[in-house]
Amino acid sequence: MNASSARIPLSKSQKAARKSKTISFIILFIVCLLFLFPFIYLVGTSMKTPSELVNKPLSIFPSWGNFTFEHYWLFLNSDNHGRIDNLPIWMINSLVITSLQVIITLIVDTLAAYAFVFFKFKGKNVIVAILLISMTIPGVIGTTPLYSLYVSIGKATGLSDVVLFTLHSVNNGVEATEYIYLYPYLWMIFPGVSGVFNLLLIKNFFESIPKDIVESARSDGASDLTIFRRIVLPLARSTILLVVLFCFVGSWNDLLWPTLITSGHPLNYTINVALVNYTGGVSDWSAKGAQTAAAVFSMLPILILFLFLQNKMIDGLASTGVKR
Amino acid sequence: MVQKQQEVQTKEQTQGNERALSNFVSIQNLAKTYPNGVKAVYDFNLDIQKNEFIVIVGPSGCGKTTALRMISGLEDITSGEIYVDRELVNYKPSKDRRMAIVFQSYALYPQMSVFDNIAFPLTINAYRFPIIEEKLLSFIQAEKILKEKSEDDLLEAIAKAKATKSNYIEKDEAFARIFAISIPAADLLLSYNLENLSAEERKDFIAKTINELEGRIAEEKKTLEAKNIKVDEACRQLDQDGKVLSEMRKMNKAEIRQRVFQAAVILDLGPYLDRLPKELSGGQMQRVALGRAIVKDVPLFLMDEPLSNLDAKLRLTMRSEIVKLHRKIGATTIYVTHDQTEAMTMASRIVVMSKGFVQQIGTPEKIYDDPDNLFVAKFIGSPAINLFAGTYEKGTTIAINEGLQLGVPANFKAITDAFYKAKLTQYQNAYDHYDDPHSQELILKMLSSLGKENPIQAEKKQKANWLKKLFAKKGAPALNNDPVKTTFEATLEALKKAQDGPREILCAIRPERMNVEIVKEGDKKKNGYPVTPTVCELLGNEYIVHFDFLGRDMTAKLGRKSHVNLDSKLLLSFDKNDLLFFDGVTGERIRL
């Protein structure tokens, strides 16, 4: 061993730093485990064989050699497993509703935030204050009036009868026709668009953009739309990704409203509604395999989205190009 | 009365029009009041000739940036007019004013590369171009090149163009640049693939092609004639009278590149075009900001403290670079700074501002040697001008201290008499028309030139504290209802006193004009006031010596060879002609 590779004794401050680092790592690890435990248990249970599901319901993972993907396989290709065979349709429902909601939210919120920050108009602060106050009212309160609106508008306009797709199926020799309606889609997308929280988040970020940059672009001849598209939006990328994530998760996990709206239209279910309907009545442990597999399946989009977005959100705004 | 006012107004108007016509930029009676009632700029008047470098200088909060922002169109104008190139621009948006702004913070777009930053203004605006018949032009140019250039030249250029490796230049563009031809012409020439032919084939091919091109040119000309389109020899479309027709269009990528490269060459930014602003140093960022101004090709540059964020050494280099740039490009420049050194070194004319008022406008020499009032004298010059108060009654001396007399010219009495008489009439007149806002501005300007606070603002601060006062033990002092009027009355009173009795005169002298001699033992006794240095600062080639003179800290400059130190004994004397006199009441200069 030569001298250079010999261990240099750590100084006191280095020791302290290492110690605090270790402690914080341990605490973070424990907290992380606590949060992740249900998910790990869920994934583990979804891979157990039916016999193990009954015999060892409390073990986290299936015992060695007993891994199985049959529960996943079942709902992806079976037509003999009851209600779960519409899962791909429900998944598509959820994806369409959520992504439309995210896109519309982004368009509305970024434009509104731009107007709030970069335009001068009377009553601006009042409107912001009203928006802030509206955040204190729980969203559930609006459910009943919204639902009655849903019903009466649907009846008055006849929109509630518009069929988007018709599905013919033959089940056990019985022919059945099922419908996917347009009207519930609209009502699942639009009331959820543009949360005030997202708007304020974006507005706050826009306010942190140095005014000089915007003024400079304006004197260069850029119109507001150009400034918005070429200067402000690219700068706000990380905030926008954050909003995408919030909005996506919020919309994906929404349960109460879609349950109300889609009752009676099983093909209009979102994945969450379908899951509740499926898991609700069954208490038999042997059915838990399919339930957990479906739950894992329903979480996949969020997981994928998060994997893609997390790096981009962290890199954020390293430099604003303005010396302050 | 009304008629008279109208007369005055029309007279002012015609004068204003004349000013607008005879100057490139004419700023008339510009004023700014913010919505919260704070008045930032009063009655700003400035005429600028083409190619001038105007520096607006003043302490922070004096309204210089507000004035610049009003000129640039970023701030609304409360009153007054701005003419640029004989055109009223008050109501024009910033982008239509044909000026470029450089901000203190550089305001680069962080997500764009240096190239994109500089190109940004070019990508959004439409510019006027002559309408060119591209097809005809490309035939003519290609034929010309084939006829005039030797084969070797052609092959060399083709090889060079094909070897071009750049994110910004395509092969055809590189080729077009070598021969200074249009890009379609370059495309045409490159499409012949001359380099793949043997020498003999090539000769035949070129001869054949020239023939073919001639045919096509004639054909194209015929088509144009049939369409009734006239063109000149550069293939620009002409109207019936033979004038070149033009159109507004956006620049194409090649034109943008050309402009950006030109700016990059001027500013030495070539190697950095691919970088992001965050990868640049402060000086480079500032150069990019300048580049963005240059590509806009506008006649007026506005710079808002562009060097304040740089370190001291870089500031010096950038200072000279901006001056050089100004000489090279010749754009009229209005430059705002709080640094009097920058103002002195860069300006062709300086505008000194304080508390929203223009204190003096003039060349650097004039501002330095011949300041209009106390504020200008104190603000310009480093180290600052030396000041001391004296009392003048009559005769040829000012009493500075008991026993100490300062000699003044024989006609000082007559001069000061005339000065105070004029001032008293002016102030009395203004006081008689107190309701006219101009009269009140007179007193505010006087306060600003003395460096005192605006009494209205002071009053506001006091009012803001009323709650505190309410709960204070002693009763709040009575609020002054009209602080301006009170100040006005006090000033008038003081002026009257000064006219009749002893006058308070402030004497000022630049540090380098002080006669300071070091007294050595055994020297003959000379005239002068003995002082001892308190601080001696060596600045390399000279000393700045601080000493105490009648209770005031004063500075003088001494040569390197004087070897002055704290033990030196100094004799101080003034040359009469180097002294500047200011009135103690209004702070205005008493010119001899």
Image (spheres, grey):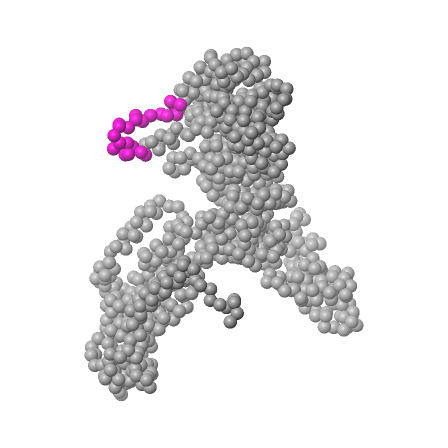
Rendered residue at 34%/54% (across/down): A200
Asked whether B3 or B126 is in front, the reply is: B126
Q: Is residue B537 magenta?
A: no
In the rendered view, does B322 fall on the left or right side of A211? Answer: right
Q: Judge whether residue A291 can be spotted in this image.
A: yes
In the picture shown, does residue B582 fall above or below A188? above
In the rendered view, does A129 fall on the left or right side of B214? Answer: left
Rendered residue at 45%/17% (across/down): B495
Residue A261: % across, % down = 25, 68
Residue A213: % across, % down = 48, 50
Q: Which residues are magenta?
A: B464-487
In the picture shown, does residue A128 fall above or below B66? below
Asked whether B182 or B350 is in front, the reply is: B350
Indicate the quadrant where residue B192 lies. Answer: bottom right
Quarter of the image containing the N terminus of chain B? Answer: top left
Residue B228: % across, % down = 65, 56
In the picture shown, does residue B327 fall above or below B413? below
Asked whether B167 or B94 is in front, the reply is: B167
Residue B103: % across, % down = 51, 46
Quarter of the image containing the C terminus of chain B? Answer: top right
Rendered residue at 56%/51% (across/down): B284
In the rendered view, does A271 fall on the left or right side of B423? Answer: left
Residue lying furthest bottom: A173
